[in-house]
Amino acid sequence: MAVCVAGCVVRGEHGPDCPGTTDDGLACPGCLPRGAVAGLVLCASCWSRLQRVVRTLPSVVEHLVAAAVPSLASPSGSAGGVRRPPGPGCLWPDALDAADDLHAGLWAWCAEVAAECPWASSPPVSGSRWSADGQDVVGLAHPSGTRGLVRWLDPHLEWVGAQSWAGVMVDELGAASARASARWPVEEPERRVTEVRCPSCGALSLVVRPVRVVGGESQVVCSRLACGRVLSEQEWERARGGLSRWPGPLPVPPWLSRPPRLGHPLLRAPPRLGSPCFRYPPR
């Protein structure tokens, strides 16, 4: 049976020649080679990892570019625009270096596929930035350039999984993507709570804010500017225990307990006929 070229083993299973201990004298955790998927040289775990790494690489690169945008001088920092190579007066943050490295590494593997796969065409060149001699790709020319490479490579992944160097490709791209993701993590968005009311104003306006710093804790706050209540851990537990059930009548928020002023949004006059939203046909 073919085994995984990445050297994967089955944990807890041992080969016939296993002495039971490692060279350091520790108990062997497992040394039986893991079998490869039929027709491939990778085990099921590495084959899944190859597909996952390649198909998520565009999102990682685009996140790195977005993380670097505030540090770029215009016009290089304009979202979605073509980036210029570094020069006087243009900052070049580390996140862009990481994005360029990921893109250039993917291009190198695409070039390898194009050279060896009998039915592969040439990979797209428009989204890449080339060296001065025009021989090598050194980075991105456009934030969506990596997505174009992955779109070209995806139909060839099964062929890649049958090549002797597939394990090296998985390790290189996977490690580079993991390093970039660890250094510039994607922040978890705030989550709106739809079943628990704020203990202060009684509105369904609570938001869970995830941990932003190392060692910090998530917070539950009321998103209404008129309230802004920050719940302690005990208050959050009590509120969750009651869910949306509230003991007694709901409190009336202060902004509803008095008549609205003339300038209140609820009393604004409807838009005039000449308003842009009533023009037809659009200009």
Image (tube, helix red, strand yellow):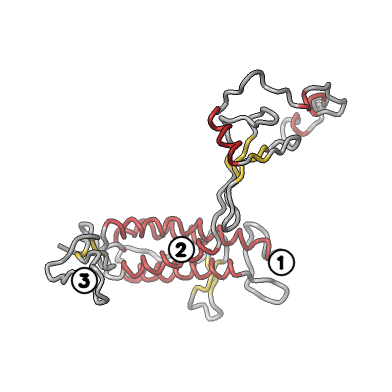
Question: Helix or strand or loop: what does disc 1 sit on?
Answer: loop
Dot 1 and dot 3 residues touching (CB under 8 Å): no
Picture quadrant where residue 118 is located: bottom left
Tell me what residue is drawn at x 45 percent, y 67 percent. Answer: 176
User: Which residue was labeled with disc 1?
Assistant: 73
Name the residue: 64% across, 18% down. Answer: 248
The kind of secondary structure element at disc 2 is helix
The mark that comes first in sequence, 2 or 3, is 3
* Residue placed furthest toward the bottom: 133
Kindly identify which numbered label has been placed on residue 112.
none
Q: Mark 2 points at which residue?
A: 178
Q: Which of marks 2 and 1 is nearer the N terminus?
A: 1
**Tag in front: 2 or 1:** 2
Mark 2–mark 3 CB contact (< 8 Å): no
The N terminus - image quarter = bottom left
Determine crowd level at label 2: few under 14, some 14-19, many 20+ residues with C-alpha closer than 10 A.
some
In the displayed structure, does residue 231 sit left or right of residue 166? right
Q: Where is residue 116 in the image (x, y as percent from the top left)?
A: 31, 70
Front disc: 2 or 3: 3
Amino acid carrying mark 3 in the image: Thr
